Amino acid sequence: MSVTAAKGFTAAGIAAGIKENGNPDLALVVNEGPRRAAAGVFTSNRVKAAPVLWSEQVLKGGSVTAVVLNSGGANACTGPKGFQDTHATAEKVADVLGHNAAEVAVASTGLIGVLLPMDKLLPGIETAAAALGEHGGEKAAIAIKTTDTVHKTSVATRDGWTVGGMAKGAGMLAPGLATMLVVLTTDADLDSDVLDRALRAATRTTFDRVDSDGCMSTNDTVLLLASGASGVTPEYAEFAEAVRAVCDDLGQQLIRDAEGASKDIKVEVVNAATEEDAVEVGRSIARNNLLKCAIHGEDPNWGRVLSAIGTTSAAFEPDRLNVAINGVWVCKDGGVGEDRAKVDMRYREVHIVADLAAGSETATIWTNDLTADYVHENSAYSS
Amino acid sequence: MSVTAAKGFTAAGIAAGIKENGNPDLALVVNEGPRRAAAGVFTSNRVKAAPVLWSEQVLKGGSVTAVVLNSGGANACTGPKGFQDTHATAEKVADVLGHNAAEVAVASTGLIGVLLPMDKLLPGIETAAAALGEHGGEKAAIAIKTTDTVHKTSVATRDGWTVGGMAKGAGMLAPGLATMLVVLTTDADLDSDVLDRALRAATRTTFDRVDSDGCMSTNDTVLLLASGASGVTPEYAEFAEAVRAVCDDLGQQLIRDAEGASKDIKVEVVNAATEEDAVEVGRSIARNNLLKCAIHGEDPNWGRVLSAIGTTSAAFEPDRLNVAINGVWVCKDGGVGEDRAKVDMRYREVHIVADLAAGSETATIWTNDLTADYVHENSAYSS
């Protein structure tokens, strides 16, 4: 499954020795054709890792023959040497596979501010290339894990064609526990403009609305590669739906594996004047540390929801706001609503509805609770 | 000390029974004149508690004869009944003291969305009025505590006049663990316009730059009352400096008592193109949960500083950024700088300098680390 579910792709995941603990840390995904169309979406953080700067250039050409990904080091804030290392990595892949380095995308994840051990990474590429196979997608997904407890893959099969993918971490344009890396593949026969359109439409309402801890990575990368190997050219709407389905599934898997989380929180903003308002309010609620602690304590503390809404510029009247937690309207017209004791918060998923009573637009943001485990995991990450 | 350090003020702090545990929960501060000039600054949260809505109106008159403050309930999101309760509280104070309710400010702090027990609060006002005294400032400061572990007071005495004050909680226009309530008093002989100017100038660079957890309260209130009892009218600059000194001292006390914190973090942004840029970058760093966890773990993880800077719209070039942690320039020109092992993080205060290399403006934001204790305290607050 994973990135090799679609025809025309091979992949591998191996341990190159980048991680000191000997776990898999290098993945290679190769588009065997006949087509090599591609699109990409990258972090909007202005401090971008070397592999992001490199891959943004590669994607401008609309063609990618291979993607090499490493965990164990983000190669971010590593200066000119870090960029040379990314370049050398792409060149090595091109050499080994007989491709052009300008069509090799690179992605990295791990600690910021540390140079990669190139003496291990470059030989690792040879090992990975020798291990490439039509069933290598699972191993590739495993090799890109950092603090992930499980690897994440998803597949959508349609009429004669498939979209598959793998992901690690959580977060995107806004968010991120750690870096999010995603590679999607399809054997549909489509050009890079169509891929780009479908990918941007899908990420806008999936990965972009997964906001685990409000921190934006320097390395976030989502790539979509098309081999054309199915010989089928689906309708745009049908293709876009399949890409969105895979992105949505992977996004949900990221939230469920968020560092230290004990609750997955669905923040649904309804009756907003505009979609932008709905997203702004949803993010403000999703990023409120006090609320995230309360949810962790299974406390339906709706005052913290109102307090978060109040910091936004969205259209609303404070005395018309309504809030439901797990189906109980604990806040009505900006004041006390149904009995908060009725709220059952025993389960992992928590559903907050914020009704702005200002229009008809809606948006859903996913986040996690804030836990002592999150603090422990992130206070000991680099040491 | 506290609000009774300046001449012309009496105060009291008593247990009215609003808090179920029997701790002090009601404070009264009275301006005995001859002058009753006042200025106030309130939360910019659009969801404002009833006492904030009330006191904003009172302050428009520029005259305040008394301030009544309660802990044990925020009276926020309590609808028309909550506003009636605030009004009744002011009327009761006016009755007991023989004042005008339109000159009585009200402030509340505690859980959102719960009505105050007026059957306890109103009799408590009579008890407090009977206990008013020239040395009551300390008890008043104690009565406004919620999760505060210590009460906070500060005094600046100048040539024949004094500015004193008390505070609870942490946070202001942006921030807040819990609500911040501050009452400052002075016996300088000044009108409300001068008070307003000095107060806004002081809060802008003190309480506004204390950002413990990025959450903004519905109840934040800072009041400055002048009795004129010293008979001295200081120069504006001298007065503004004294007000700023007291605000700065109280702000530092708030940070040192922040919920669950083990580190006080001074984020100093230097060489910014504008002061706004410096503040935006400082806040982004101060609100980065991943960095706050790293600091808790005594890990000089400067990559998270760069990652936070990268999410702002401030003027900078990524490859010209420099970061120092406790005096060690761990990041130079956007890449690896001095050895991070040189950074000593054993002490409570941590000093981060972010050099944007884009101008000559500067700003300092204070925050805390993110700890398991913060999570515990805030996951069990209302239950």
Image: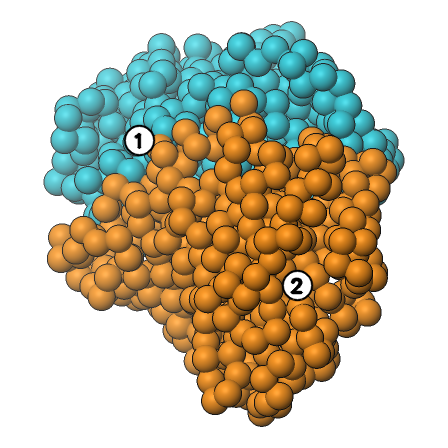
Chain colours: A orange, B cyan
Relative placement, left or right, of B365 versus B324 is left
* Residue at point 53%, 42% (across, down): A24
| Amino acid type, callout 2 | Val
Q: Provide residue B381's location: percent of width, then percent of height.
A: 26, 36
Q: Provide residue B356's location: percent of width, then percent of height.
A: 80, 35
Mark 1 in CB contact with mark 2 (< 8 angstroms): no
Chain at tag 1: B
Kindly state the secondary structure of the residue where label 2 is placed: strand
Q: Badge 2, how many Cα within 10 Å: few under 14, some, many 20+?
A: many
Which callout, 1 or 2, points to the residue nearer the camera? 2
| Amino acid type, callout 1 | Glu
Q: How many marks on residues?
A: 2
**Which residue matches tag 2?**
A30
Residue A318, quarter of picture:
bottom left
Is residue B208 visible in the rendered structure shown here? Answer: no
Q: Which mark is residue A189?
A: none
Front residue of A96 and A212: A96
Considering only vertical position in the picture, is A133 above or below B379?
below
Is residue A92 visible in the rendered structure shown here? Answer: yes
* Residue at point 51%, 13% (across, down): B348
**Which residue matches tag 1?**
B377
